[in-house]
Structure formats: structure tokens, C-alpha cells
Amino acid sequence: MILLRPARLSDASNLAALGMQVWLHTYATQGLRDTIADYVLNTFTEQRCRQRIADAQQSLVVAERNAHLVAYAALDFSTTHPSVPAAATELATLYVQAHFSGQAIGTRLLDACAELALERTGSAQLWLTVNSQNSRARHFYAKHGYTQCGTSYFEFGGERHENLVMCRPATPRKDKASE
């Protein structure tokens, strides 16, 4: 059984390792080189994860099975993108370990994030960026009603990688009395 819950500071090292593992599996498809190694070793750290968990402008949700973290999602309430001015909440991260893909964990995290955004901002509309070469992620988001609404670039190590900005129309909360 998969349990979704808010991230705790004690999750920081597991989040760092999980983030590094998923990022490398997704983006280091041709192997490792200095720019990739430097990026993951400087980005996915326990300290950075602790900062994200403690940041009031972010919200992290973890998925665990048998007390093992298998996925997580992070919302950022402080960033906007010119392509989606009406959407105030960025889905900054949605990572699922490869062993657990295809089990609807990503869908559950996506739904939980939309609910969190709705509770906090009054809108369930999320925006995100996805690497234009990541067809699996693009398909996942499209399946959940996300469409491309812009383009941005992710830069690291002097390299520039095209990302798609994706969003979906906000779905109003159903009033229990009207169901």
C-alpha cells in the first residue's frame, strides 16, 4: 500500500538520494560526464532538501511503501511563468522511482498537489516544465489534461536544454452539496 504524506525534515537524505536517482535515470541516458555529476552532487543534497521542506513557499508530498520513500512531488507557491500568468503554483518536481512507475503513484501525487494548491491559493491550476526530450513525462502530463503553453530553457554546466511549459485549465472544486 502506498501512503502519501507531507515531507518531514527527517526525510531529507532519502529525498536527496531519490531525486538524484530519478534525475540520473531520466537525464543521464548517455552516461555520466562532469557537468552532469557536478549538477546532481550540488543539487540533490540533504541540506537543500531540508531547506525546501522548511520553506513556507514550498510544499513537498512523499509517497512511501513499507516505510520506504518511492516518489515525491514538490510545489512552489512563489514562482510564476509568463506563459501561464493565471497559474500561481508550480509543480516544481514529480519524481517516481523507475521500479514504481506504472502504479498510479504519479497520478496520486499530481492529484494531491492540485488539492494542496486549491486549499492554499483557491486554484488547482498548476504549471510545470518538462524536458522536451522526455517523452514519457510529456505523455504522462498530456494524459492528465496538461498541454504545452510555452517554452523555457534549463541551463547547467554551460548547456541549454529546451523545456516545455505545460499547464491545464483549473477544475473548480465540486461542492459536496451539489453532488
Image: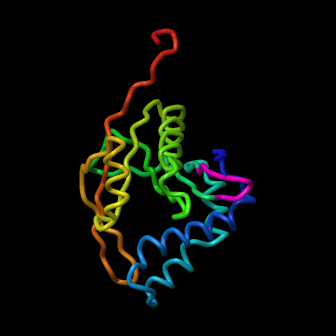
Image spot of residue 62 (x, y percent):
62, 52
Q: Seen in the image, is 46 located left or right of residue 152? A: right
Which image quadrant for residue 99?
bottom right
- Assess whether residue 63 is covered by the magenta stretch: yes
- 75 lies above or below 68: above
User: What residue is shown at x 56% (from left), y 50% (from top)?
Assistant: 58
112 to 177, vertically: above or below: below
Q: Which residue sits furthest bottom?
A: 34
Residue at 45 percent across and 20 percent down: it is 174
Q: Nearer the viewer, residue 33 or 2?
A: 2
Toward which corner of the image does residue 21 lie, by quadrant? bottom right
Residue closer to the observer: 88 or 115: 115
Q: Which residues are magenta?
A: 60-69
Q: Is residue 147 left or right of residue 96?
A: left
What secondary structure is the stretch in magenta mostly built from?
strand
Q: Residue at x 54, y 38 (%)?
A: 116
When the figure is inspected, residue 170 is found, relative to residue 24, above or below; the finding is above
